[in-house]
Image (tube, helix red, strand yellow):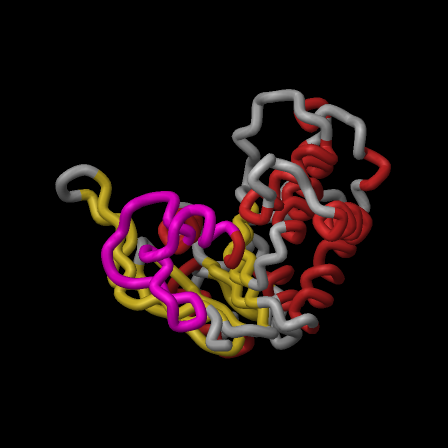
Amino acid sequence: MTGLEVNDLTVTYGQDTTVVHNVSFEARPGRITALLGPNGSGKSTILKAVTGLIPSSGSVHLDTVLISKLSPRERASVLAYVPQRSALTSPLHVKRVVELGRYAQWSSYGGLSSEGEAIVQQAMERTQVSQLSSRPFTELSGGEQQRVLLARAIATGAKTMVLDEPTSALDIYHSLQFRRLLHELRQDGFTILIVLHDLNEANETADDGVLLLNGHVLATGPIDHVIAPAPLYEAYQVHLSEERSLRFGLDPT
């Protein structure tokens, strides 16, 4: 198992607007890799390119297999994507939304096997949404929806998860529970690539980091090498205290 390997990833909109420039990094099994950077640095765009949702050049391999060569069904069985916000507008019940994570494994008549039913139930229990099972998804709060989307991702059975700011709508309790679950998945050998906005959260959550600025990579490697004084100041103009917490400030005059 080699995880995700991203090489020279470039995303261009229109004829000449390049927003991601030759980005390369790795996300390994049993590790949490955080994409970091200021707003507009290309984090969410990279996730969409990695998952094949938008066109790009360069290459993305998952366990040595070129993702662009996989069919949508094959890709869905090995790579799970949790967006920052759901585009779902139909008032499907929560359980049905989580069941949709199993579509790549559905039988020819479109039903779930008994094993699939058990996997869906376990995913809902792990993300604490079982009590929402019969609620319409569209009536949930943003935080509740995010936990349902995570349950759907777990239900796919994919061992690689790509998440876009999954804690942004969560309260402090569920944010901490979410972090605990990510660490459990890491211990289970999952490859986890996650966009995080809060650098203190990234410092406490991730094993590795990729720091971006204007679509370029500033730093990659272990998180304590990425969340470090020089790259952070270049990206954010913030200083890192001795306690490794962040404080805003300008250069002394």
Q: Residue at x 54, y 52 (%)?
A: 80
The correct choice, above or below, for 172 with respect to 5 in the image is: above
Residue 169 is situated, as x and y percent measured from the top left of the image, at 66, 40
Q: In the displayed structure, does residue 181 sit left or right of residue 248? A: right
Outermost residue on the left side: it is: 15
Residue 184 is situated, as x and y percent measured from the top left of the image, at 73, 66
Which of 100 and 245 lies nearest the eye of the viewer? 100
Q: Residue at x 58, y 48 (%)?
A: 105
Residue 95 is situated, as x and y percent measured from the top left of the image, at 74, 35
Residue 174, visible in the rendered structure: no
Residue 104 is situated, as x and y percent measured from the top left of the image, at 54, 47
Which of 129 and 247 lies nearest the eye of the viewer? 129
Residue 71, visible in the rendered structure: yes
Q: Which image quarter: residue 182? A: bottom right
Q: Residue at x 51, y 73 (%)?
A: 28
Q: Residue at x 42, y 46 (%)?
A: 72
Quarter of the picture containing the C terminus is bottom left
Q: In the displayed structure, does residue 215 sit left or right of residue 75? A: left
Stretch of the chain drawn in magenta: 51-76
The correct choice, above or below, for 32 with respect to 196 in the image is: below
Q: Which image quarter: residue 54? A: top left
